[in-house]
Amino acid sequence: MADAATAYDVIIIGGGPGGYNAAIRAGQLGLKVACVEARNTLGGTCLNVGCMPSKALLHASELYELAGKEFAKIGIDATPSLNLGQMQTAKADSVDQLTKGIEFLFKKNKVDWLKGRGRILAKGQVEVTAADGTKTVYGCKDIVIATGSEPTPLPGVAFEEGKVIDSTGALSLAKVPEHLIVVGAGVIGLELGSVWRRLGARVTVVEFLDAVGAGMDAEVATAFQRALTKQGMAFKMGTKVTGAKVTDAGVELTIEPAAGGASETLTGDVVLVAIGRRPYTDGLGIEALGVETDKRGFIGNDHLKVADGIWVIGDVTHGPMLAHKAEEDAVAAIELIAGQPGHVDYALVPSVIYTSPEVAWIGRTEAQLNEAGVAFKKGKFPFSANSRAKINHETEGFVKVLADATTDRVLGVHIFGPEAGEMIHEACVLMAFGGASEDLARICHAHPTRSEAVRQAAMGVDGWIMQA
Ligand code: FAD
Ligand code: NAD
């Protein structure tokens, strides 16, 4: 074993949104920092096989569908034909540019990329195994674990390339499936299901629960599922998968009602398993340090520090498994390491589903407020009454603002509609400052914008909607 006791202030294990943001922030604060990443490229799940390639395909497939189905209505005659190879190449080029961008930022911020697989030997000691098997041990004051997550397999249903696939497989299909069966009506299932439906697949989604969207506001979930159904997606709700048989033609999936009952067989050429992700800690060596995982495999708690000199951020620890949450953890952990007051408000992490229309929300749902016994008022405004949405023929959906019945402080904002993922951020800022619905209602919004619907919904809390 080679020995290179180079003393770093911080070694970060994992180069995803948690790891690379931590590394960059450490560099900015003048810490001597290294980031260990086993992949050939930086950026983690998000840049390589997650957020970014999925958004590339969502964007391209949305344009394809618009060109085929909507352009003629506004006077543009076009007959698009799909070049899936080029769509995948364009996606790969964008991903390549993004991952190289992180390499550039590492150089700019004096971050050393230690290429290989990291293992914690002891407090302040990380062993890195390079692709050729060479092992080097590096020393540091603090270690940040940012090893991310991996797809959760469906018990009894083994992955098989091209047939029973996870999200990574679904991002790189070389041909549009005839019938794609998606297991799990969460974020991945609905985003990637939308991609392949738009490109021509028949898509059936099998979901264990009775509602889509893994915990979104129930009223939004109902409207969202209705919209996806209208677009052509089929749903088998309240249904569990009991088995899968891979044949030459594809996959036979046995399903039955979650509450029990007669089983049936669904036949598809591809099955996408998207039932969640689980923390990834294989070979990390945390057991020897006495750092424990919970029964689902997550390390630590909400406090980022798990032991003296050991920190944990991103998907591998608690909280929503989102790139921007990993980034928040990263900045807070490094600032704490640097002796500054780092902090994350987990109640104010927005969620976005990048379908069409999009869904975005922040704060609490109606059900959560009811369950907590919080009295609240509600303002709701439909995009069918928003002039910009009307002009753009994007009138599906609504904005809902939930505010405390006594103080008027905004407790939750839920948007189902065009560009919801961009519009949610005025609610994020408002809520971070403890704003009231009246604050939002009295702030001038440019006309004509979709964001006026957010303002109108805020006006609705006090009953003075003006545009509907
Ligand atoms: P990761 O991004 O998983 O990075 C961890 C890195 O650590 C990996 O590169 C891995 O190779 C490396 N690693 C692990 N163990 C070791 C080791 N021992 N040594 C060296 N390296 C190691 N989130 C959003 O916010 N918005 C989205 O639109 C979105 N879309 C998504 C779409 C898909 C299809 C998927 C799968 C996920 C999506 N996510 C999205 C979730 C997002 O990708 C994750 O929340 C985010 O990547 C978590 O960042 P992380 O740094 O914690 O972990
Ligand atoms: P998810 O938690 O969003 O959804 C999983 C769904 O599968 C849930 O609806 C759940 O009820 C269902 N399910 C679980 N077990 C099942 C079973 N046995 N049979 C049928 N249904 C079952 O998980 P995901 O869609 O796999 O996404 C994983 C993570 O990646 C999420 O935490 C998400 O935050 C993140 N992600 C985020 C984005 C985004 O921000 N736009 C996009 C993709 C992924």
Image (spheres, rainbow, N blue to C red):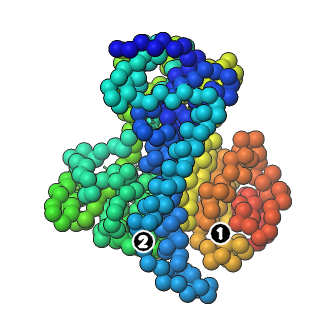
Which quadrant of the rendered structure holds the N terminus? top left
Q: Is residue 353 left or right of residue 30?
A: left
- Dot 1: what SS? strand
Looking at numbered disc 1 in the image, what kind of residue is underneath it? Pro
Residue at image coords 45%, 73%: 231
**CA–CA distance in space, label 1 to label 2:** 36 Å
- Dot 2: what SS? loop
Q: Is residue 383 above or below residue 302?
A: below
Residue at image coords 68%, 28%: 28
> Which of the two discs, 1 and 2, sits closer to the camera?
2
Density class for disc 1 (Cα within 10 Å; few <14, some 14-19, many ≥20) is many
Density class for disc 2 (Cα within 10 Å; few <14, some 14-19, many ≥20) is few
Front position in the image: 165 or 42 = 42
Front position in the image: 247 or 359 = 247
Front position in the image: 310 or 241 = 310
Mark 1 CB near ligand 2 (8 Å cut): no
Is residue 275 at least partly visible in the picture? yes
Looking at numbered disc 2 in the image, what kind of residue is underneath it? Asn
Dot 1 or dot 2: first in sequence order is 2
Q: Which residue is mark 2?
A: 83
Residue at image coords 80%, 61%: 445
x%, y% of residue 5?
48, 12
Q: Is residue 58 above or below residue 403?
A: below
x%, y% of residue 305?
54, 21
Q: Which residue is mark 1?
A: 382
Which quadrant of the rendered structure holds the C terminus? bottom right
